[in-house]
Structures are given as structure tokens and as C-alpha cells.
């Protein structure tokens, strides 16, 4: 009985070889049917599901090594005819389009022919990136969290068949049961969409169905809100990094000119120092550094999931799920740190009043003097002369603080929506999760780009501080240095008689070495991250 089947197989293979090797999606059914005769000869017989290993080896797929003693009594995925409804999306596609390994007989091992993976769908659903109005489903899937997680090896993230396929006779979903979006019986039809979402998100509310799994922020016509947020983030990023990038460049040039004309700056002799940051402030900054680096290393791989370094980094962290747990731990710690800080600010406001706390010399809100200092600093960049007389905080430090504080609220708020989508779907429409993902990733990228370039330069890499500014780690600054860099603060402390109480002995060698190591390690990780981001942007 099996011998004629084998003859038909080889005859059909010869016929199929005369047909075009790659029929286009949507072409006439007759040509695909002709090409599929080869497959239907065996896979159209229901008995194929119960063939013994010997029968399968004799007719189709010889296997290397000893044959297993037994196989499951029934393997319905081999019998494909009932899986393909008449209106299925792939009814006019040749089998070998999704199963290229099956072009030859005998077939390779079955597990090497799988067609349910996302990369198989890419062959037909990946249009040129320039065609934004008709963007391919593959690219927009890769932009989504599902696609990013799938690209990093997640087995839980929804793939194409999870949302687009009907269940087969065995209850499983496969590419053989894919139907069009407009099919009223399809899993994404209006009456079935919520049930489809609830297979992975069982607690999702009805508004969850407004989520756009293939949203593209570049497409202003289809996604106007998302496009507006994306556009505004690009503008903000260009303004922030552009302005302070120019600020850093001009500073570097002026510092070089000063060094040539005046010689190297004098190094303050070891001696008495002024306590600038207390122990709690230094600990808080240390926790902030660790959280920021941890969030960057565990979150950025999702944004660049197609990059080999992203997959390698996630592998080092123990996989995507482990990286997600670590990311949430750092996020929770950062949120707690911000809340503690704001509680301290509130206590000081109650004790000293809002004006003195927020707008006084020690306050971190911008004052008129900060704008004057900024103009004076640019005058020094371009014309030389004297720097402005800074007080406790410079205008760029205030910008760092306010940007970090506001960014923490943005990242935390959007992150909580993404962390608990089922809960928040009771209160916000599904498209809010598209916005939250874009905002979360955009703000994180802005923070990483700014901190690892501009902030590192201002704090450590500018010529008068290179290679390390120890003050945030030791808490102490040389008195002569404070008088030179922040004359307004030094004069204020001297007038108030506070200098004697703030004088401390110079930090020991061990503390200075530890501070230098911490700073160098943080900068090395940050600069390496910037290099990887630039490489990813250039390669896309």
C-alpha cells in the first residue's frame, strides 16, 4: 500500500519542480494547489497521524540513529487538511513557502521544518521600511513588547499564531488556521478579540481590546496620538542633549585655551576640607547610581532586541524573565528612594517655609540668577574672562536634578501601567499602553543618553575634574577649591559663620581609592552602553 504512495511522491516532486519555486502571496489558487499536491499526498491522509516509525521511515523521513520504541498514538498536526478553512489567509500559499525544508524528499527531521515562528512569517509580511503608510506586519510586531520579548528568546510572548490563528481539532493554534483580520469568525474579530487577549491576560477588561499590537509611532495617519508623543520626545531629546552637548563642547574648547594661555590649574594642597554632602546624601546618590545602571542594563535590551549584544546581555542576566524581575526590583527601589527624598523636602518646607527651601540659596528650583549665570558662562566660553560666581548649585546641576526627578515620575508612571496592564485596563483604554511603552522607552533612552554623556562630562570628565570628581563619594571638597569654584557659597558660609563647623580632615587614601573605583566603574558601564546604543542606531 505504501509503495504507490512513494511513487506518487516522487512524481509529484518532479511536477512541482517545474512550477515556480516561490509563488507570490495572493496569486491564483490553482498554481499553489498544484505545488501542494506533493504535500497533500501524505498529509491529506488522516492515517498519517498514526503511522509507526517504521512506516514513516519507509515512506517519507528516514531518521538517523535508533528509532524510538513508540510514538504518541495520535499526532494530529501531521494531518493538515481540516486545519485550513476555505477562507484562510494562507489558502493560496504553497506549503513550501512556510516549510522550505520540505522542498526535498526525504524530508529533514520534522522539528526542523517548523513554520510557526515569527521569522517564517517575515518572508511575506516584511515590507520595505520606506513604505510607512503600508508598513509590514513583521516590523511593527518587532516594535511591540511582544516582538521585542520574542526577539530576546521569550517563550511566553505572543507570536503571530497566538493572536491570528483559529484552534485546530486538537485545540492548538497553528499557521494552518490563520484567518484574515476581517473574518467575522477570526480570533481578532470584534466578538472574539477580548477572549483572544484573555488567553494571555485573563484579567483584562473590555477596554484592553483597544491596544494596538502593531502600532507604529511613525505613522501619523493611523496613530496620531502615538506619533505626536514620539515626535515630541525626539524634539525634547534633541533640545536637551543638543544644548548641553554644545555646552560641553564649548567648555572643553575654552578649558583647552585656558590651559595653553595660563598653564595647568593649581592643585589645592592637602589640608582642611569642607563637608559638602552628608552621609545620607552620599548613600542616596550611591543607591541612585546602582538603580540607574541596573535599570539601563536590564531595560535597554528590549529597545534593541534585534541586536546580538542585547540577546547576549539578557543571557548573562539569566534570561528575559530573570532580567524582568531584576528590572522591577531596581524600579521599586528607585520609586522608594524618590518618595523618601520628597518626604524630606516636604519636612524642610514645613520647617523653613517653601520660599526659603525651594528658592533660597540651597534650593534646587531655578532662580533669576541661574539664567544670568548661564549667559555669563557662555560669555566665558566665547570670550574668556571670569566665570560667574556660583552658589551651592549651578544651573546645570539644577537641570540635572529637575530632569531626573521629572523623568522618575514619567518612567515610574508608565512602567506601572506596563507592569500591571490587566489592572489598569479597568481605568484606561488599551491604546494608553501603547503610549506608556513609547514614553517609558523614550524617557529611559533620554535619561541614559543625557546622564552617560552630559552629566558624566560635567561631573567627572571636564578638564578641571578629570578623571574623577570625588566629592559625591567622599562628601568633602578642599576649602580652597570651594572658594575658587563656588565663591558665592563660600562667602555666604563665611558670613554666616558656618565654615568652622563644616571643616573636616582630608579623606584617607583608602576612601579616595574606593571613590575613584566606583566612579570609574560607573563611567565605564555608561560609556560602553552609549557605544552599544550608537552601534544599534547606525546598524538599523
Image (spheres, rainbow, N blue to C red):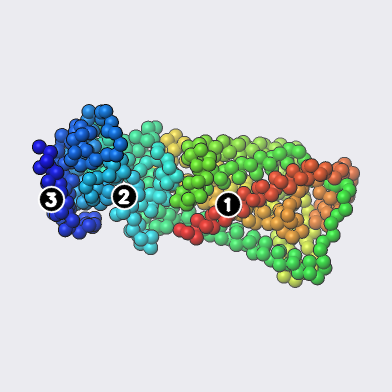
Which mark's residue is nearer the viewer, 3 or 1?
3
Whether residue 81 appears in this view of the structure is no
The picture places residue 530, in percent across and down from the top left corner, at: 58, 54
Q: Nearer the viewer, residue 284 or 439?
A: 284
Q: Residues within 10 Å of mark 1 (few under 14, many from 20)?
A: some
The picture places residue 531, in percent across and down from the top left corner, at: 57, 56
Q: Earlier in the sequence, mark 3 or mark 1?
A: 3
Find disc 1 in the rendering and name its residue: 529
Q: Secondary structure at mark 1?
A: helix
Q: Nearer the viewer, residue 216 or 74?
A: 74
Q: Residue at x 24, y 45 (%)?
A: 107
Q: How many labels were placed on the picture?
A: 3
Whether residue 238 appears in this view of the structure is yes
Q: Residue at x 67, y 64 (%)?
A: 249
Establish if 264 lies above or below 179. below
Determine the CA span between mark 1 and mark 2.
32 Å
Q: Earlier in the sequence, mark 1 or mark 2?
A: 2
Find disc 3 in the rendering and name its residue: 11
Find disc 2 in the rendering and name its residue: 121
Q: Residues within 10 Å of mark 3 (few under 14, many from 20)?
A: few
The picture places residue 295, in percent across and down from the top left corner, at: 57, 43
Q: Residue at x 35, y 52 (%)?
A: 138
The quadrant in which residue 186 appears is top left
Q: Residue at x 19, y 38 (%)?
A: 58
Decide if residue 411 is on the left or right side of residue 469: left
Q: Secondary structure at mark 3?
A: helix
The picture places residue 100, in percent across and down from the top left corner, at: 27, 50
Amino acid at each position: 500500500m505504501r509503495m504507490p504512495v512513494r511513487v506518487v511522491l516522487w512524481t509529484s516532486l518532479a511536477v512541482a519542480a517545474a512550477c515556480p519555486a516561490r509563488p507570490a502571496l495572493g496569486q491564483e489558487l490553482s498554481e499553489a494547489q498544484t505545488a501542494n499536491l506533493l504535500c497533500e499526498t501524505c498529509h491529506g491522509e488522516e492515517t498519517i497521524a498514526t503511522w509507526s516509525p517504521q512506516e514513516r521511515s519507509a515512506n517519507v523521513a528516514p531518521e538517523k540513529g535508533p528509532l524510538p520504541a513508540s510514538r504518541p498514538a495520535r499526532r494530529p498536526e501531521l494531518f493538515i487538511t481540516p486545519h485550513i478553512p476555505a477562507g484562510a489567509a494562507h489558502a493560496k500559499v504553497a506549503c513550501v513557502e512556510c516549510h522550505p525544508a520540505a522542498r526535498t524528499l526525504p524530508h529533514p527531521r520534522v522539528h526542523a521544518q517548523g513554520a510557526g515562528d515569527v521569522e517564517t512569517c517575515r518572508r511575506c509580511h516584511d515590507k520595505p521600511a520606506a513604505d510607512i503608510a503600508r508598513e509590514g506586519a513583521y516590523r511593527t510586531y518587532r516594535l511591540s513588547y511582544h516582538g521585542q520579548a520574542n526577539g530576546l528568546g521569550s517563550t511566553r510572548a505572543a507570536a503571530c499564531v497566538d493572536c491570528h490563528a483559529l484552534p485546530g481539532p486538537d485545540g492548538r493554534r497553528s499557521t494552518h488556521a490563520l484567518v484574515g483580520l476581517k473574518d467575522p469568525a477570526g480570533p481578532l474579530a470584534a466578538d472574539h478579540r477580548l477572549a483572544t487577549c484573555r488567553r494571555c491576560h485573563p484579567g483584562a477588561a473590555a477596554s484592553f481590546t483597544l491596544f494596538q499590537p502593531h502600532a507604529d509611532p511613525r505613522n501619523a495617519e493611523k496613530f496620531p496620538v502615538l506619533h505626536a508623543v514620539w515626535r515630541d520626545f525626539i524634539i525634547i531629546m534633541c533640545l536637551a542633549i543638543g544644548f548641553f552637548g554644545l555646552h560641553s563642547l564649548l567648555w572643553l574648547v575654552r578649558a583647552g585655551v585656558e590651559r595653553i594661555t595660563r598653564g595647568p590649574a593649581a592643585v589645592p594642597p592637602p589640608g582642611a576640607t569642607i563637608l559638602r554632602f552628608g552621609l545620607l546624601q552620599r548613600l542616596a546618590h550611591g543607591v541612585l547610581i546602582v538603580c540607574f545602571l541596573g535599570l539601563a542594563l536590564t531595560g535597554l535590551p528590549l529597545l534593541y532586541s534585534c541586536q546580538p549584544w542585547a540577546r547576549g546581555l539578557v543571557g548573562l542576566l539569566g534570561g528575559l524573565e530573570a532580567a524582568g524581575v531584576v528590572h522591577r526590583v531596581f524600579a521599586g527601589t528607585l520609586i522608594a528612594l524618590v518618595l523618601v527624598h520628597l518626604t524630606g523636602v516636604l519636612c524642610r518646607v514645613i520647617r523653613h517655609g517653601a520660599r526659603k527651601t525651594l528658592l533660597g540659596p540651597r534650593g534646587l528650583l531655578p532662580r533669576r540668577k541661574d539664567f544670568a549665570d548661564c549667559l555669563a558662562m557662555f560669555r566665558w566660553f566665547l570670550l574668556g574672562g571670569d566665570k560667574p560666581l556660583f552658589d551651592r548649585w549651578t544651573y546645570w546641576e539644577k537641570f540635572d536634578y529637575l530632569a531626573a526627578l521629572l523623568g522618575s515620575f514619567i518612567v515610574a508612571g508608565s512602567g506601572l501601567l506596563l507592569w500591571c496592564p490587566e489592572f489598569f485596563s479597568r481605568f484606561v483604554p488599551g491604546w494608553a499602553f501603547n503610549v506608556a511603552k513609547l514614553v517609558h522607552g523614550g524617557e529611559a533612552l533620554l535619561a541614559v543618553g543625557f546622564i552617560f554623556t552630559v552629566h558624566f562630562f560635567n561631573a567627572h570628565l571636564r578638564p578641571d575634574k578629570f578623571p574623577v570628581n570625588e566629592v559625591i563619594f567622599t562628601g568633602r571638597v578642599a576649602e580652597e577649591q570651594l572658594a575658587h569654584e563656588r565663591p558665592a557659597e563660600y562667602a555666604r558660609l563665611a558670613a554666616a559663620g558656618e565654615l568652622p563647623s563644616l571643616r573636616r580632615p582630608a579623606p584617607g587614601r583608602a576612601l579616595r581609592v574606593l571613590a575613584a573605583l566606583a566612579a570609574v566603574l560607573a563611567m565605564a558601564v555608561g560609556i560602553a552602553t552609549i557605544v552599544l546604543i550608537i552601534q544599534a542606531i547606525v546598524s538599523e
